[in-house]
Amino acid sequence: MANIDDEPIPDGELVLQTLALPKDTNSNGDVFGGWLMSQMDLAGAIAAREIARGRVTTVAVGNMAFLRPVPVGSTVSCYCTILDVGRSSIKTVIEVWVKQYDKNQQQKVTEGEFIYVAIDDRGRTRPVPRDD
């Protein structure tokens, strides 16, 4: 998506924001892709939990695209869009954008599709509550 100045802007709602630290790097000195995926999963679970009004679990991740490396010290922001709510499942798209402290622009670094299922206290699938 773009704004009126043709600057790209994130899709979805900001759900999670954190700082990329040196402990999160891979052998190349960039932030490890698995760390980014875990932040995305946390963001998606927060959004899904609100819809499910309770526990959820991740059941699938798909269509991941890593667009550029993430430098240490970047502010990492996860934006979530709900694509579909089924009987017990919640399908999301999560975009990750970073902003470096020395630059005044955000860049999209990855996106992916995450699917969650509402579960009860025993870990069994349960229906997502509906507002009728």
Image (tube, helix red, strand yellow):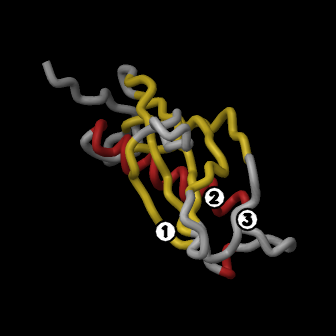
Marks 2 and 3 sit apart, C-alpha to C-alpha, by 7 Å
Residue 109 placed where, x, y %?
66, 51
Q: Amino acid at mark 2?
A: Leu
Label ID, residue 57: none
Mark 3 residue crowding within 10 angstroms, few (<14) / some (14–19) / many (20+) = some
Q: Which residue is mark 1?
A: 18
Mark 2 residue crowding within 10 angstroms, few (<14) / some (14–19) / many (20+) = many
The answer to which image quadrant residue 39 occupies is bottom right
Q: Amino acid at mark 1?
A: Thr
The answer to which image quadrant residue 61 occupies is top right
Q: Earlier in the sequence, mark 2 or mark 1?
A: 1
Label ID, residue 32: 3
* In the image: residue 68, left or right of residue 9: right
Q: Nearer the viewer, residue 119 or 90?
A: 90
Residue 87 placed where, x, y %?
36, 21
Q: Which residue is mark 2?
A: 36
Element on which disc 1 rests: strand
Residue 85 placed where, x, y %?
38, 24
Element on which disc 3 rests: loop
Q: Amino acid at mark 3?
A: Phe
Mark 1 residue crowding within 10 angstroms, few (<14) / some (14–19) / many (20+) = few
Residue 119 placed where, x, y %?
37, 39
